[in-house]
Amino acid sequence: MSPHASGRRGHLLRALRHRNYRLFFGGQSLSLVGTWITRIAVAWLTWRLTHSAAMLGIVGFAGQIPTFLLGSFAGVWVDRLDRYKVLVTTQVLAMVQSFALAALAIPGVITIWEILALQAFQGVINAFDTPSRQSFLIDMIEDKADLSNAIALNSSMVNAARLVGPSVAGVLIAVVGEGWCFFLDGVTYFGIVGSLLAMHVVRRPRPTTRKKVLHDLADGFRYAFGFVPIRAVLMLLATVSLAGMPYTVLLPVIAAQTLHGGSHTLGFLMGASGVGALCGALVLASRTTVVGLGGWIPRAAATFGAGLMAVGLSRWLPVSLLVMVVAGFGFMVQMASSNTIIQTLVREDMRGRVMAFYAMSFMGMAPFGSLTAGAVAARIGAPWTVFGGGAICVLGALVFSRYLTRLREIVRPIYVERGILPVVAEGLGSATSLREEAGP
């Protein structure tokens, strides 16, 4: 390997220089494969038991609505408590949930009501897990210049698992059934729990406060939605989550009825989305600066929406796989870019609450979309429902683009004031404006 190629690889993986993050990356990579296996197995089990697009939407709603209802309160507690301990606890509870699904599904006694209950339980876990995980990320990275790379590597990790997990799930479901998928997921949690326990964590003193939870919650809400750049990013993310993300709960219907396939077809579709998402994550990981990243947000959202529209129109598996790659790329880039912008803007004392609002926008709006999509699909069909959701994503991206210049003007002086590297200090600004200010 040439020194130049070696240097590029080192740059791409620079966040792995940090021991705690390296442990987290290894353990979480294993666990996320199991998580994606379970997502596919739950969707297919629900479809097999009910053959109802509406019930797929309800199951998705049950698993995601706790994030919307509890996410803001969870963010307050993440700011008050030890993020590390919260994260260990949520991982142990998630492992218990997977083994409970396996204990019911392997002997074949599981019912749709038990699926709903256990999905809701996982949703409660996720409400606390997501803001603690996002907030703890900055504690694992000693050199904050590597933060954006760590976020991109996280996305790479999620989407590599998204590529592997559904394909494995499709085979396992066909060979041994959904129950053993849940059991394997439970086993993979030992990886992330073990990696967390092996970390050398410097405990930061948590702020002591006499304020009530609702008071802290109101402070966090005023900060997040009173600050125009964060508000704009969250609003677009919520729109994409509400309108676009429900495609995942409708894919079993498209795989079975539109493309006339089985569980392996569903696995291929999710795997294709994972390929696109992984490519997007690697593109972001190769970036050295957040300059111009704000402009990627609406472009990626529009790409995701266009991909979904094509999925809704396609009736041939090869075409569906190709446009799923496009949709996966767009969604991942939009989500990770939004995360990076927010993480670099947010005040430290508000980090848990703002990342909880991020989780609510990303995951908390999805249940309403899933419920709506299931009901709409029962009337007009899954393909046209996915097409409509994609069109809404494109429209949201166009609205965001109209305000991009104003957002750049607000963010630029904030990055300068915080002493971030000069190229990063341009924030959402373009590389062109950077060159103009630097002079000839």
Image (cartoon, rainbow, N blue to C red):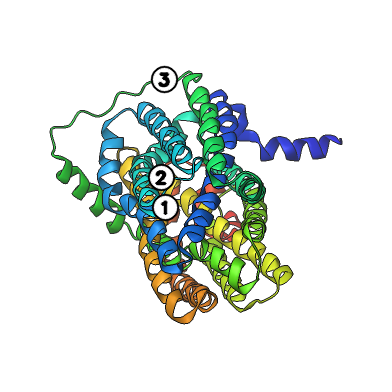
- Residue type (three-letter) at the residue carrying disc 2: Glu
- Residue, disc 2: 417
Please identify the quadrant where the C terminus is shown.
bottom right
- The answer to the question of whether label 2 and label 3 lie on touching residues, with beta carbons closer than 8 A, is no
How far apart are the alpha carbons under marks 2 and 3? 27 Å
- Residue, disc 1: 413
Please identify the quadrant where the N terminus is shown.
top right
Q: Nearer the viewer, residue 218 or 413?
A: 218
Nearer mark to the viewer, of 3 and 1: 3
Can you give x and y, in whole percent of width and height, for residue 277 in the image?
Answer: 62, 55
- The answer to the question of whether label 1 and label 2 lie on touching residues, with beta carbons closer than 8 A, is yes
Give SS at disc 3. loop
Can you give x and y, in whole percent of width and height, for residue 74 in the image?
Answer: 29, 42
One can see residue 432 in this view: no
Q: Which mark is residue 202?
A: 3
- Residue type (three-letter) at the residue carrying disc 1: Pro
Which of marks 1 and 3 precedes in the sequence? 3
How packed is label 1: few (under 14 Cα within 10 Å), some, or many (20 or more)?
some
Q: Is residue 316 left or right of residue 427?
A: right
In the picture as drawn, the residue positioned furthest to the bottom comes out as 380
